[in-house]
C-alpha cells in the first residue's frame, strides 16, 4: 500500500500518524509480512506522483498481483487495519506452519492437530456461536484465524477418517 502525500497538506499531516501506526501494526515483532506500507512525498518525488496520476492528497493505492487499486474506505487506524487483514495478510496454512503462521497460531494449530475430528468439529461449533457477539477487533481477527485453522484441520481429519473406513 502506498500513501501519496504533500507535507504542507493538512489532511496528509492528520493521516501521517495513523499511517505510521498501521505500518507498525502490520509487521509486529519483526515478523515477515506479505504487506508493505510505504509513503511517497509528492514534494520530493513529483515525477512519481505525476506518473501515478495523483491529483489529491493523501491518496492511498494498493496493488494485488500487479493491478493498481484506489483505497476508498475510511482512514481511521481500525478501518485501515481491518482492510489490510481482510485483503492482504497471508493466512496460516497448516501444511506450512513455519512459513505462514505467527507464533500464537502455530501453538494453536499444533495443539489442535492432536485432537480428534469430533473434538475439532465441536470447537468449530463453539467458536461459531461466539461470532455473533460484539468483540474487540484483535479478538475478532484471532477468532477468524482459529476458525481458519480448525476448518483446515477438519478437512484433513475428515479425509483421514474416510480413508480409514
Image (cartoon, rainbow, N blue to C red):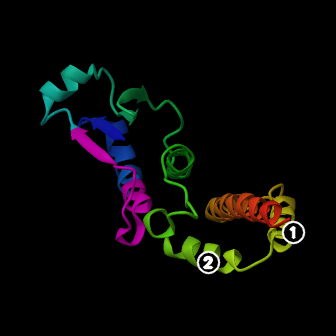
- Disc 1: which residue: 122
For numbered disc 1, what is the local secondary structure? helix
For numbered disc 2, what is the local secondary structure? helix
Disc on the earlier residue, 1 or 2? 2
- Comparing 41 with 13, the one in front is 41
- Comparing 43 with 98, the one in front is 98
Residue at the location (75% across, 64% down)? Answer: 160
Whole-number angstrom distance, CA of label 1 to CA of label 2: 17 Å
- Disc 2: which residue: 110
Residue at the location (32% across, 44% down)? Answer: 13
Quarter of the rendering occupied by the C terminus: bottom right
Provide residue 115's location: percent of width, then percent of height.
76, 78
- Residue 87 part of the magenta segment: no
- Numbered range of the magenta stretch: 21-40
Answer left or right for 91 relative to 132: left
- Comparing 18 with 81, the one in front is 81
Residue at the location (55% across, 63% down)? Answer: 95
To which quarter of the image does residue 51 belong?
top left
Residue at the location (55% across, 52% down)? Answer: 78
Answer left or right for 31 relative to 134: left
Amino acid at each position: 500500500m502506498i500513501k501519496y502525500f504533500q507535507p504542507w497538506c493538512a489532511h496528509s499531516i492528520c493521516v501521517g500518524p495513523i499511517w505510521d501506526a498501521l505500518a507498525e501494526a502490520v509487521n509486529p515483532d519483526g515478523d515477515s509480512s506479505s504487506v508493505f506500507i510505504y509513503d511517497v512525498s509528492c514534494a520530493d518525488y513529483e515525477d512519481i506522483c505525476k506518473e501515478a496520476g495523483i491529483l489529491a492528497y493523501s491518496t492511498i493505492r494498493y496493488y494485488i498481483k500487479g493491478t493498481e487499486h484506489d483505497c476508498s474506505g475510511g482512514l481511521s487506524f481500525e478501518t485501515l487495519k481491518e482492510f489490510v487483514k481482510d485483503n492482504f495478510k497471508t493466512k496460516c496454512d497448516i501444511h506450512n506452519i513455519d512459513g505462514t503462521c505467527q507464533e500464537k497460531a502455530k501453538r494453536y494449530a499444533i495443539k489442535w492437530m492432536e485432537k480428534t475430528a469430533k473434538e475439532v468439529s465441536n470447537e468449530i461449533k463453539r467458536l461459531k456461536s461466539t461470532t455473533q457477539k460484539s468483540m474487540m477487533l484483535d479478538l475478532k481477527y484471532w477468532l477468524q484465524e482459529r476458525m481458519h485453522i480448525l476448518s483446515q484441520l477438519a478437512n484433513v481429519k475428515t479425509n483421514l477418517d474416510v480413508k480409514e473406513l
